[in-house]
C-alpha cells in the first residue's frame, strides 16, 4: 500500500519513454493532447488509435497497467454514451418508442467522445507510468521557471509537492495507529448506519489533524534550520539534460499536431 | 564562540528566557539540563537564528543572528538536530536528505555527491543511501540528520533532546557519535533529560524557569546537587559519593559505573 503511494504509478523498465527527459515528455504530451482534440473524423480516430497502440507497445509496460487508469472513469464514460444516445438528435432515425428516439449520429458521437477520452487517458498514463513523481515535479519546476517573473513561487511549490509525496507513508502509518488506538478504546467502525459511520471517523480525523499541525511546525523549523532560504544562491544537484532523443521526440510530436491539423482541414 | 549577551525571550507576557548571558567556547562539549518548560529548546533555536531575542543579542563567531544577510551562514555554522526523527526528514531518500542542505548553501553540484557520501560514511549510513525514510529506524533517521548537518561543515552542533525518542542502543550510538565529532573539533551542545548522558560533557548548564541556575563540570554540578535533590544524580556518582563518605576513597575523576567497579576491584 505504502509502496504504491510513494512511487505513484511508476513502473520501471528501460524503454525510450523511461529514458526521456521529463520536460520533453511533458511538452510532447501537451502536443499530443492538442492533436487529439483536433480530431473530427474517422481517419483521425484510426490514426490516433494506432499512435497510442504503438506508444504502449514501445513503453514495455503491460497493458493492464494502462487499463487500471481507465477504471475510475468508466462510469462517467458509460453515462456520456447513454446521454448522447438518448438525448441528442440527428437525421437518421434508427429506433423510436413513444418519446424515446435514437439516431445514428448520436450513437457515433457518443462513442467517438468516449474513444477520444480513452485515448487521452492512455497517453497521459504513458507519462505517469514511465516517470517518477519527483522527476515529474522537477521537470515541471523548470518548465514553469518563466512564471517566477510573475512572482509565482515555483521552487517552493516544487518543494511542497516533494514533501507531500514524502509524508504520505508517514500519515498512512499514523492513520493505522490512530484507528487501532481508537478501536482499543471501543470505537466502532463497522456500524452500518451512514450517520454513525461518518461520526465514527471524527475520533480519527481530530487526532490526525492535531499531529499533522504539530508535524508541520517541526518540519518548518527543520527546513529553516538547514538553511533553506528565499531560493537565492541555491544550487541544484540534479541537472536535467536534453539529449538528441528529446529533440527528436518533441519534433515528432509537433509533426503529429501538423498531421492532425491537416486531417481536420481535408476532412474525410 | 557562541555568545548570548543579556538575552531575553518571551511568548506574549510569558518570559521564557530571562536575561541570559552565556559564552560557549570552541571545543566545548556542553550539556544543558533542566525541567520541562525551562527554556532549553528556545535557547537552541536562538543559537542559529530560528527565533530572535527580544532583548539582548546572540553572536555566532562574532556575527549577530539578527542580520538577515548572515542567516544562511549562521545556519551552516550552527547545525540543529531535533527530537523527532520523522519530522526532520524532509526529502524522499537518505541521499537526497544530505543533498538538500548542500543545495541550500549553494555548493557546486559537481562536488555534492562526494561530500554527501563522505558525510553518510561518517555516520555509517552510506549503504542505506537509496532508502526512503519509512524503511529506517528512528536511530538511523537521526544519524541521517547528523550526516545532513555534517555535510554542511558546521562548527557547532546543537542536539535538542535528539536521543529522547530512541531505544538504549540507538541512544548510545548517537552519544558515541557526538563524542567522536567532539574529538574532531566540533563544538557540541547536548540538551537532555538523561543524567548519565551528561557525564561525557566537559561542562553542564542547569536551566530553570528561564534562568541559568548552575554552570560547571559534571562532577561539581552533581556534587552540589546530591543533597538538594533537584537533579536526579546518576547512579555512578551516588555510589561514588556514598563510598567516599564511608571512607573508601574513590578518585574524584571516576565518572562511570565501570570506573567505580574497576577501582573497587583493583584498590584493595
Ligand atoms: N510556540 C510557543 N508558543 C507559546 N509558548 C511557547 C511556545 N513554545 C514554547 N513555549 C513556552 O516556552 C517555555 C519554554 O519552552 P521550551 O520549549 O524552551 O522548554 P524546554 O526546556 O525545551 O522544555 P522540554 O524539556 O519540555 O523540551 C514553556 O513554558 C513553553 O510553554
Ligand atoms: Mg525542548
Image (cartoon, grey):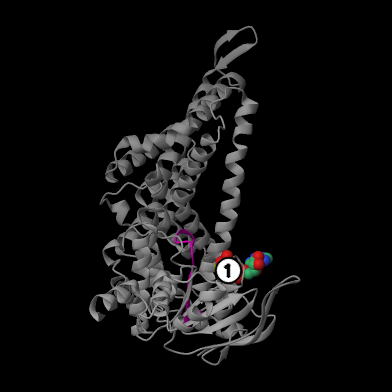
Taking the spot 33% from the left edge, 34% from the top edge, the residue there is A64
Point out the stretch of residues depicted in magenta.
Answer: B75-87
Q: From the image, tell me which residue sits under label 1.
A: B35
Q: Chain of mark 1?
A: B
In magenta segment, residue B233 = no
B259 lies left or right of A34: left
**Is residue A124 something that shows in the picture?**
yes
Determine the residue located farthest toward the bottom in the rendered image. Answer: B62
Q: Nearer the viewer, residue B261 or B164?
A: B261
Q: Report if the beta carbon of the residue with label 1 is closer than 8 angstroms to ligand 1.
A: yes
* Quadrant location, ligand no. 1: bottom right
A28 lies left or right of B33: left
Determine the residue located farthest toward the top in the rendered image. Answer: A98
Quarter of the rendering containing residue A245: bottom left
The image shows residue B86 at horizontal and vertical percentages of 46, 58
B93 lies left or right of B35: left
Quarter of the rendering containing residue A251: bottom left
Secondary structure, mark 1, is: loop
In magenta segment, residue B85 = yes
The image shows residue B127 at horizontal and vertical percentages of 26, 63
Taking the spot 74% from the left edge, 70% from the top edge, the residue there is B12
Residue B216, relative to residue A196: is it above or below? below
Q: How many marks?
A: 1
Residue A93, relative to residue B221: is it above or below? above
The image shows residue B226 at horizontal and vertical percentages of 51, 75
**Is residue A261 something that shows in the picture?**
no
- Assign the C terminus of chain B to one quadrant of the image: bottom left
The image shows residue B129 at horizontal and vertical percentages of 31, 63
Amino acid at each position: 500500500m505504502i509502496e504504491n503511494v510513494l512511487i505513484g504509478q511508476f513502473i520501471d523498465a528501460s524503454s525510450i519513454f523511461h529514458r526521456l527527459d521529463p520536460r520533453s515528455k511533458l511538452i510532447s504530451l501537451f502536443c499530443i493532447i492538442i492533436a487529439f482534440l483536433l480530431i473530427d473524423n474517422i481517419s483521425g480516430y484510426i490514426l490516433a488509435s494506432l499512435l497510442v497502440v504503438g506508444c504502449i507497445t514501445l513503453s514495455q509496460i503491460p497493458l493492464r497497467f494502462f487499463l487500471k487508469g481507465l477504471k475510475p472513469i468508466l462510469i462517467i464514460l458509460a453515462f456520456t454514451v447513454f446521454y448522447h444516445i438518448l438525448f441528442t438528435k440527428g437525421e437518421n432515425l434508427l429506433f423510436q418508442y413513444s418519446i424515446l428516439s435514437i439516431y445514428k449520429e448520436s450513437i457515433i458521437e457518443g462513442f467517438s467522445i468516449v474513444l477520444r477520452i480513452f485515448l487521452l487517458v492512455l497517453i497521459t498514463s504513458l507519462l505517469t507510468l514511465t516517470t517518477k513523481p519527483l522527476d515529474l515535479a522537477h521537470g515541471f519546476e523548470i518548465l514553469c521557471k518563466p512564471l517566477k517573473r510573475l512572482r509565482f513561487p515555483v521552487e517552493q511549490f516544487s518543494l511542497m509537492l516533494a514533501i507531500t509525496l514524502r509524508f504520505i507513508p508517514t500519515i498512512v502509518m499514523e492513520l493505522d495507529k490512530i484507528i487501532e488506538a481508537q478501536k482499543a478504546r471501543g470505537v466502532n467502525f463497522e456500524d452500518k448506519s451512514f450517520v454513525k459511520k461518518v461520526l465514527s471517523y471524527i475520533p480519527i480525523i481530530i487526532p490526525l489533524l492535531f499531529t499533522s499541525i504539530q508535524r508541520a511546525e517541526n518540519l518548518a523549523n527543520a527546513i529553516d534550520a538547514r538553511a533553506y532560504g528565499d531560493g537565492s544562491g541555491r544550487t541544484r544537484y540534479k541537472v536535467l539534460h536534453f539529449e538528441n532523443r528529446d529533440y527528436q521526440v518533441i519534433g515528432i510530436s509537433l509533426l503529429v499536431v501538423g498531421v492532425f491539423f491537416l486531417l481536420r482541414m481535408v476532412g474525410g | 564562540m557562541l555568545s548570548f549577551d543579556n538575552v531575553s525571550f518571551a511568548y506574549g507576557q510569558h518570559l521564557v528566557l530571562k536575561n541570559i548571558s552565556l559564552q560557549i567556547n570552541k571545543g566545548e562539549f556542553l550539556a544543558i539540563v533542566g525541567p520541562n518548560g525551562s527554556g532549553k529548546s528556545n535557547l537552541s533555536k536562538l543559537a542559529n537564528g530560528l527565533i530572535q531575542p527580544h532583548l539582548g543579542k546572540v553572536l555566532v563567531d562574532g556575527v549577530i543572528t539578527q542580520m538577515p544577510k548572515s542567516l544562511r551562514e549562521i545556519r551552516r555554522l550552527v547545525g540543529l538536530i531535533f527530537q523527532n526523527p520523522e519530522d526532520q526528514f524532509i526529502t524522499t531518500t537518505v541521499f537526497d536528505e544530505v543533498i538538500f542542505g548542500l543545495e541550500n548553501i549553494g555548493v557546486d553540484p559537481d562536488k555534492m555527491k562526494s561530500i554527501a557520501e563522505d558525510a553518510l560514511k561518517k555516520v555509517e549510513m552510506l549503504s542505506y543511501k537509496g532508502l526512503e525514510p519509512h524503511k529506517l529506524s528512528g536511530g538511523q533517521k537521526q544519524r541521517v540528520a547528523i550526516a545532513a548537518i555534517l555535510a554542511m561543515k558546521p562548527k557547532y552542533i546543537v542536539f535538542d533532546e535528539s536521543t529522547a525518542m530512541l531505544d538504549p542502543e540507538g541512544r548510545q550510538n548517537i552519544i558515541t557519535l557526538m563524542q567522536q565529532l567532539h574529538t574532531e573539533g566540533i563544538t557540541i551542545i547536548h540538551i537532555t533529560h538523561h543524567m548519565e548522558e551528561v557525564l561525557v560533557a566537559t561542562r553542564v548548564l542547569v536551566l530553570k524557569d528561564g534562568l541559568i541556575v548552575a554552570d560547571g563540570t559534571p562532577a561539581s554540578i552533581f556534587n552540589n546537587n546530591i543533597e538538594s535533590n533537584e537533579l536526579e544524580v546518576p547512579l555512578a556518582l551516588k555510589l561514588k559519593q556514598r563510598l567516599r563518605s564511608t571512607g573508601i576513597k574513590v578518585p574524584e575523576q571516576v565518572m562511570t559505573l565501570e570506573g567505580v567497579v574497576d577501582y573497587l576491584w583493583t584498590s584493595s
